[in-house]
Image: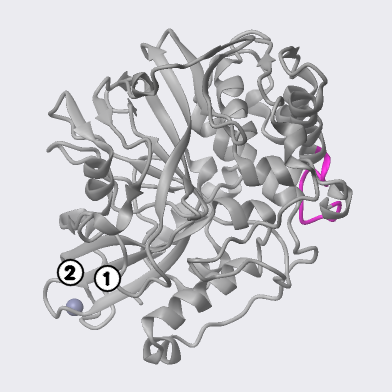
Amino acid sequence: MPPITNANVASLTKAIESGNMNISTGSYNRMRSPSRYIQPSPERTIRGNNLIKPNVVNNNTVERVSNPTVTFYSITSIPQSTNYKDDECTTSETSMNESRLVNGGLCGLQNLGNTCFMNSVLQCLSNTKPLLLFCLKDDLDNYLNTSTTSVMRGILMNEYANLIRKMWLIPDGRSVVNPSSFKDTIGKFAPRFTGYSEQDSQEFLRYLLQGLSEDVNRVRQKPVPITIDEKQEERMKEKDRAKASWDRCLRYENSPLVDIFAGQLKSTLECSYCQYQSITFDMFWDLSLPLPRDRSSTTLQECIQLFMSKEELNGDEEPMCTKCKKKRPCSKKLSIQKCPEILVLHLKRFSQMRGRTKLNTYVDFPITNLKLGHLIDVMSESHDGPTPTYNLFGISSHSGTVYTGHYVAQCKHPFINEWHEFNDASIHLISDISRIISSNAYVLFYERNKS
Ligand SMILES: [Zn+2]
């Protein structure tokens, strides 16, 4: 593994210290992330690779960052469930009679003052079937993590489940729920959401998923740090290394939310001088896809390929090559090692470059049958099981500009399969589904095709 540089350690430590320890997200992001998101996985710290480097903006077409920030923090131990295999569904079904839910979920959310970003994400998550079924479990209390490995000690999950229950179990379905109690609670977990200013729906999603995951983390005691024998690791088959890395992540964070949303990325760093390849694996919760900067339209598949494409690291970005024991120009390539059950794709419409700007690029995306296996160099060769296809079921959409905009959600009902647009308190049926593909689409929610 290439060693971590002192500068990287220093900046990382600073990020951790200055960051809000309540928060960590496992988002895999090629874009600049606020430092408070950056928390190292314990594994990364132990292994000391050099992925944590200053973000770099490439002047060509896309904003690229040499180091995806990958995070999983949570103080835990003893993994219990979570299958690794790609072809297995890991979410346990609820005893809830699904026919009861046919009339549920078509429920507006009151806007509490610039809270459309929150409502939009809540509607997408409300229609995320495995999460919904988990929230409706009769014995949900048994899953709540009231130990010190969760900042909120189960309160956030409890509050979220209460909201979801109101949205799904109220008798006449079509009503409006006031999410203020939930909002107060998420504000305690992530104070930035305390006020009533407009926020980014994807950032909100990350905080929320992280908070919920902690609250049902199966790991209730801080795990003992382990040392990795890198020599031994290098002799292992790539597939086994990926599995070992995943298991190490689960020592810290292992929850139904991980079962539902987490996937694994492989990162290959190759020295251009000696061709030595350094391979690392990271858990991700969503992928932040760059959009081509020079075009008015593109496809989702193209954005995914752009995210996974080989990136040259030169000049200041040069990593240390373990073999050469020198900084060398390297290429870096990402690929998917393990596909999540729910794949969240974030279209990087907002840029921090020269003030905040928004790209209104039209991204054409498949509503059914997104086939990752058909995309060149997107899946790792050593990934486990058949490559799944994905169907869209939710969109968090943003209309307007950076300064004045509005979020809505388009979601497919998980039991009747009809699409509706959720605009705060109001809901309407979308009869022409092709209309959901628009340049407003911002965060896309895909579910694995089970058939
Ligand atoms: Zn080298």
Residue 280 position in % (x across, y down): 39, 70
- Tell me if residue 406 can be seen: yes
Locate residue 313 relative to residue 307 in the image: left or right: left
Please tell me which residue is depicted at 24% across the width and 62% down the height of the picture: 332
Please tell me which residue is depicted at 41% across the width and 10% down the height of the picture: 403
User: Residue 221 occupies which quadrant of the picture?
Assistant: bottom right
Q: Along the line of sight, which residue is nearer the eye, 330 or 358?
A: 358
Circles 1 and 2 in contact, beta carbons < 8 Å: yes
Please tell me which residue is depicted at 31% across the width and 62% down the height of the picture: 379
Q: Amino acid at mark 1?
A: Met
Q: CA distance from mark 1 to mark 2?
A: 6 Å
- Check residue 328 in the rendering and tell me which mark sits there, or answer none: 2
> Within the magenta stretch, is there residue 150?
yes
Please give the range of residues in magenta.
146-155
The residue labelled by disc 1 is 320
Q: Amino acid at mark 2?
A: Arg
